[in-house]
Image (cartoon, rainbow, N blue to C red):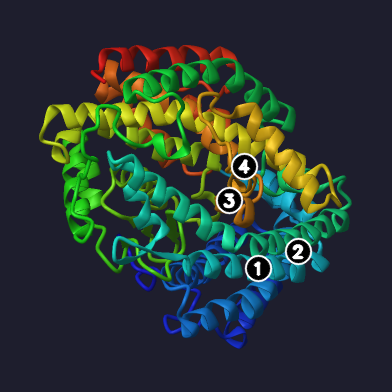
Amino acid sequence: MPTATDTRTFTPGDLDPSDWGQLEPLYQTLLDRPIGLPEQLRQWLADFSELSAVVSEYGSRRNIDSACHTDDPVIEKAYLHYVEQIAPKIKPVYFELQKKFLAVPCHAGLDAQRFGELIKQWRSAVELFRPENVPLQTEVAKLNNEYDKTVGAMTVEFDGQTLTLQQLSRYLEEPDRETREKAWRLSADRRMADREIFEGIFDTMLGLREKMSKNAGLSDFRAYMWKALDRFDYTPDDCLAFADAVEQVCLPVVDKMDAQRKSSLGLEVLRPWDLSVDVKGRPPLRPFDRDAPQELVDKSAEVFRRVDPGLGEDFSTLKMGRNLDLESRKGKRAGGFQSSLQASRQPFIFMNAAGLDGDVRTMLHEAGHAFHFIWAAADEPLVFMRHAPMEFCEVASMSMELIGVDHYGLFYPDRRDRDRATRSLLEGIIQILPWIATIDSFQHWIYTHPGHTVQERTDAWMQILSRFQRSHVDWSGLDDARASMWQRQLHLFHVPFYYIEYGIAQLGALQLWLAYRNDPGKALSAYRSALRLGGKRPLPELFEAAGLKFDFTRATLEPLMAAISDELDRLPA
């Protein structure tokens, strides 16, 4: 893959993106340059793209460093410098450059197949931009840094060790029920200790976001985010209808699974700490040594080689430090993500591996995002058109989780363990859809009820949670923990309204998985071809290119849930 300086013609190789004094003249050159002729416009776009890629990679690197080391003051200072001193100055200039592009008549002569989506997205962005929102966005970014620092500092003492909450989660799979309950309560109590901090951060964010929507002349922040996220192909009502479908189709299956779990465990009631343990009392699945993340990398690479040699080759280019930070540790942001380093065209995978079965799925998932970026960036020189809508990006990642199942023997030589891991994945898909509906419905309520109180928000959360809750699980005596469960969902803080994408994409990934089982070569060829399109096609066309239906109604959900149920019936418990 090319490096940042291999192909630079506009930005100096020694450019320091942390210095606005070096960046400003480059942006000004683009603002001043005539682009009235087609050849002028093409070169201008290429130079704008090059500068954008360099700055984007610098910002991504500062975010990655901050995520990996939330407790390092030097790293935090560099990250906040970018957030406070660089990004806010770029946004209004970027807006002027987008306006300049849209204003020249020759842009209409660009290939509609290649540039149509970019023009549509930039037109929407210009309509949405307000300079007075830039400092508000900066304040939100700083609040997210506070959220990350608070989460990164969460540790507990358990079994003679200091553990992060991710590391503690291993004990929720232990056959001994007393151990599981102790671990669950310890984790819940640690989160509860910071409950008021999170409420305060979120309330401040809400006020800033409401101001942003008013400044943009929109009815509420939901309308603001619909434009900001370029959601051209579905509406809020479509999302609420998806939640209805999940309630009707998925909850009965979840109830059946929980009833079977309760019976198999010989319990009168299920408690929250009974949901991850093996129903036959077998020891937890341990696919790799938690202290040897390279083992996870090596085995994942072989999974991809067996699926497709090209996938294995691409994955093997990822190296620890440069492209990967995997192990869970104190001072590290929660969760996992893939970050696209646009100038060097390198992916970066961040996660909190603790030696769990779920870590395998996370690695396969984030690798799917990495493949998407590698292929899109290889084929598309303009940075603006590499990134597909997130609803399709998640198809890329979730598909790899499902396709990789056939090669779980690399992690689990015993066939019984492979079956357990496969069952866990498929049951998890059925179970996550109600959670997606819960989080998405909660966001719709939050941002269409401006000015609500903390108590009103809590009441709404509990009502929505009860709608999609697992009926066989007894939460008695745990009301405070339930009431604050939403605070662990990073998306609510960092990327509001980004969660329905997982539901839409899961239905696409399931379609691809079924196609793969029928004809692996054809399914993978369509997958690769669709990912190479980057963001150059509308969302429905990207699904179509992969051989999938862009539909998240009950008509699509119901047969897919039936297919999973059939597969589960074939697997031993």
The residue beneath circle 3 is 491
Q: Which amino acid does label 4 sit on?
A: Glu
Nearest to N terminus: mark 1 or mark 3? 1
Which callout, 2 or 3, points at the residue further toward the start of the chain? 2
Front residue of this view, candidates 388 and 466: 466
Label 3's element?
helix
Which residue is tagged 4? 117
Report crowding for label 1: few under 14, some 14 to 19, many 20 or more residues within 10 A (C-alpha).
many
Residue located 43% across and 72% down the image: 65
Residue 144: x and y, percent?
Answer: 61, 65
Q: Do the residues labelled 1 and 2 touch (CB within 8 Å)?
A: yes
Residue indicated by mark 1: 143
Q: Are marks 4 and 2 in contact (CB under 8 Å)?
A: no
Other-residue count near label 2 (Cα within 10 Å), few / some / many at <14 / 14–19 / ≥20: some
Say whether residue 113 is left or right of residue 224: left
Where disc 4 sits, the SS reads helix
Q: Which of marks 4 and 2 is nearer the N terminus?
A: 4
Which residue is farthest left? 413
Name the side, left or right, on which 480 lies relative to 158: right
Q: Position of residue 346 (x, y in %)?
A: 36, 60
Residue of label 2 = 204
Res 546 quadrant in image: top left
